[in-house]
């Protein structure tokens, strides 16, 4: 189970999550920097995949399709935004 209020300490943006989607391989830093948090713009690079979840802030993004411990990924600076 994942926190639904993640916040990035690098860009100070809330991490958005999208159920049943993954990010296209062509996604890059500038795409997220220019388009977060506009869902209408982000959809251009979202691919439907049942059971997956796409996460993104303004500087980092991940597509998850299996149980994964995000705390082990050192480059991610996502923390619980407190409930």
Image (tube, grey):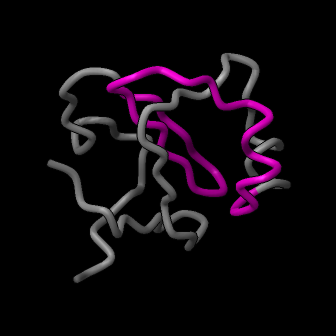
Determine the residue located farthest toward the bottom in the rendered image. Answer: 83
Determine the residue located farthest toward the top in the rendered image. Answer: 25
Q: Nearer the viewer, residue 72 or 81?
A: 81
Image position of 18 with respect to 23: above or below = below
Count of numbered badges drawn on the protein = 0
Image position of 69 with respect to 67: above or below = below
Instruction: Report which quarter residue 65 is drawn in.
Output: top left
Horizontal relation, residue 22 to residue 35: left or right? left
Which residue is painted at 27% across and 40% down in the image? 70
Residue 15, image x and y in percent?
Answer: 48, 60
Instruction: Report which quarter residue 77 is drawn in.
Output: bottom left
Q: Nearer the viewer, residue 9 or 24?
A: 24
Q: Nearer the viewer, residue 16 or 61?
A: 16
Instruction: Report which quarter residue 44 is drawn in.
Output: top right
Which residue is painted at 43% across and 68% down in the image? 7
Q: Nearer the viewer, residue 22 or 48?
A: 48
Which residue is painted at 23% across and 45% down in the image? 71
Image position of 43 with respect to 82: above or below = above
Which residue is painted at 31% across and 63% down in the image? 4
Looking at the figure, which quarter contains the C terminus? bottom left
- Which region shows up in magenta? 36-64
Residue 61, image x and y in percent?
Answer: 55, 40
Residue 5, image x and y in percent?
Answer: 34, 69
């Amino acid at each position: 189970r994942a926190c639904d209020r993640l916040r990035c300490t690098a860009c100070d943006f809330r991490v958005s999550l999208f159920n049943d989607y993954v990010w296209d391989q062509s996604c890059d830093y500038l795409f997220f920097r220019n388009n977060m948090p506009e869902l209408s713009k982000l959809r251009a690079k979202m691919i439907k995949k049942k059971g997956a979840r796409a996460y993104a802030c303004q500087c980092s993004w991940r597509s998850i399709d299996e149980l994964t411990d995000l705390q082990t990924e050192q480059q991610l600076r996502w923390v619980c935004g407190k409930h």
